[in-house]
Image: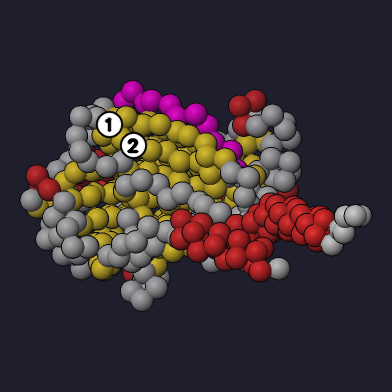
Amino acid sequence: MPGARGLVLGALCLLGALGRPPAGRREVSMHFNPGWNDSSVNLLHVRAVDANSTLHYVWSSLGVPAVLLLYTENKHSTLHINWTQLLSPEPAGAIWVEPPSSVLHASAVVFTKLFEYDGANASGPAHALFYPPYDLAAFSWDSVNQTLNHTALTAAFRGTGPPRTFHNGSIAFQVTAYEESSRDRRLPGLLHTANSSKLEFVMNGVAPRGNSSRFMLEMLMVEGPGRHRRLESVRSIDDEYTPTIFEMVQLVSEPQGTQAGPGFLQWKTTAYGAREAKRENGIRCRYSPLQAVNGTLLGPSIARAYFGKDVGGLAAINISFGGEDGEIYSSTGYLSWSVLLGFGTPPEDAFSPLVVAIMAVALGTPVVLLVAGAIVVLFFQKKRYSEYEPIN
């Protein structure tokens, strides 16, 4: 029917445009241990430049796995590393940006511990029995240079823990940088912009210490003063891109009293129990409330190298994997969880053109039929009255 077809096409043109990711492109380069020739140290500098600004991501397994995000309002800003100081017991001040005044946002995420607990209690980790945690600072890490792909803009930090517990198992932090806005083809199908990068946390072959073991990753958020954090759940009625998952979680850090934009972490509440992520191997993902941490950054890390030891803006959050579906890891020995890290407004999912077309047909077709029916009725009524001959 022409009316319904026009309605669908109009909806596709209008709402399809609204569903597209924001425009923008950055020139991305990746540098392994810039200024240092020893491959036993793992530091990856990802530099993403556009016409007016530069994003510096610094990923490292030095001391404890961490990522440092710096946004500068200068396309020519440069990252500097004092390697002698960075590798010393007191690394504060070993990483900085020139010019310092160009930095509008600085934050870090430190991955401190991997917990394992008995998940037989369905109420979650709050009432569970915990095994001794894995301290990620004690892990051994392969050279990230072996996995660095300058074309795909990917790299992986692969670590192994104590052999008596991990056996042949490993964990990895897989990094992906982006030049432009798009959506990942692999589940969970995260929408990203050129102002974000993806981290995929992977467990492979780690032997559970119990029959109902679940795992939980602890993350420490580090920032300078003058920022306000909020943890929020964004729900949707559309699960087209991540089947059966209707919740997106984002941790947003907003500046107070400045024009700088926010930084964010964003993830879907699901992990997957196979390399080829599918709906049937999805694993429920829970998160704890954000908790302020009173203390200092202990031990070497790139976060301490930039912010120093005494940082006021510390907060911790835990991501746990597995609920009633937690047995998937026990059967496959594999788990992956993806999170976006970036600067600016977090990407927001919108209805795709396909969903809009279905909604337009479902809602618009009855209206078109009603209008067409009314026109037909009026036509026949007019025809009947026009053919009536009055009796003389």
Residue at 52 percent of width and 52 percent of height: 350
Judged from the image, the secondary structure of the residue bearing numbered disc 1 is strand
Q: Which residues are magenta?
A: 285-301
Within 10 Å of the Cα at label 1, are there few (<14), some (14-19), or many (20+) other Cα atoms? some
Residue at numbered disc 1 = 227
Identify the image quadrant of residue 192.
bottom left
Where 76 falls versus 312 (above or below)?
Answer: below
Relative image position of residue 72 (x, y in whole percent): 18, 51
Identify the image quadrant of residue 8.
bottom right
Q: Which mark is residue 73?
A: none
Where 85 falls versus 232 (above or below)?
Answer: below
245 on left or right of 52: right
The kind of secondary structure the magenta stretch mainly shows is loop
Q: Say if mark 1 contacts mark 2, CB within 8 Å.
A: yes
Magenta region includes residue 182: no
Relative image position of residue 229 (x, y in whole percent): 36, 31
Magenta region includes residue 296: yes
Judged from the image, the secondary structure of the residue bearing numbered disc 2 is strand
Relative image position of residue 312 (x, y in whole percent): 26, 27
Residue at numbered disc 2 = 253
Which residue of the protein is positioned furthest toward the right in this rendering?
391
